[in-house]
Amino acid sequence: MDKNQSETVDRYVSFMNIDCYQHATDVIDAIIEVTANEKYSNRFWEVFKEKIPQSYYEKKSDEKVLYHVCASVFYIEELFELSNHEAGLALMKNCEYQCC
């Protein structure tokens, strides 16, 4: 790649027009739905729910909600896979690929 070409390549990825907060809240909604069934709930999920930022409940956009989801991507995907919650799995993959 020559010098002129490298100057025209924009490798910056923008989060403009991606609502990462909404993606994360959709994932948390699905987690709460799945873990309402005792079969899929355990101590990990109870602690996870206890640590959901207050801004989620207040419906205030806050990066802490996204951080909470992104910190547990693999556990969340496993939960949705074990519970056969296809919608939740799709939401998590969307959030992960676009925002985490």
Image (tube, helix red, strand yellow):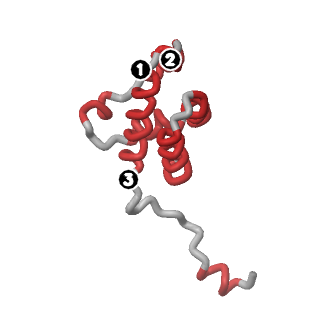
Residue mark closest to the camera, 1 vs 3: 1
- Residue pictured at 39% horizontal, 41% vertical: 26
Q: Position of residue 78 (x, y in %)?
A: 61, 31
The answer to whether mark 3 and mark 2 are in CB contact below 8 A is no
In terms of secondary structure, where does tag 1 sit? Answer: loop
The reply to whether residue 86 is in sight is yes
State the image quarter where residue 25 is shown.
Answer: top left
The amino acid type, in three-letter code, at marker 1 is Ala
The answer to whether mark 1 and mark 2 are in CB contact below 8 A is yes
Label 3 belongs to which residue?
19
Disc 1 from disc 3: Cα separation: 26 Å
The answer to whether mark 1 and mark 3 are in CB contact below 8 A is no
Residue mark closest to the camera, 3 vs 2: 2
Q: Position of residue 50 (x, y in %)?
A: 40, 19
Label 2 belongs to which residue?
41
Dot 1 or dot 2, earlier in sequence: 1
Task: Give the left or right position of residue 30, taking residue 61 as reference.
Answer: right
Q: Residues within 10 Å of mark 1 (few under 14, many from 20)?
A: few
- Residue pictured at 46% horizontal, 33% vertical: 68
Q: Which mark is residue 36?
A: 1
Question: Looking at this view, is 13 or 97 the one in front?
Answer: 97
Question: Looking at this view, is 56 or 30 the one in front?
Answer: 30
In terms of secondary structure, where does tag 2 sit? Answer: loop
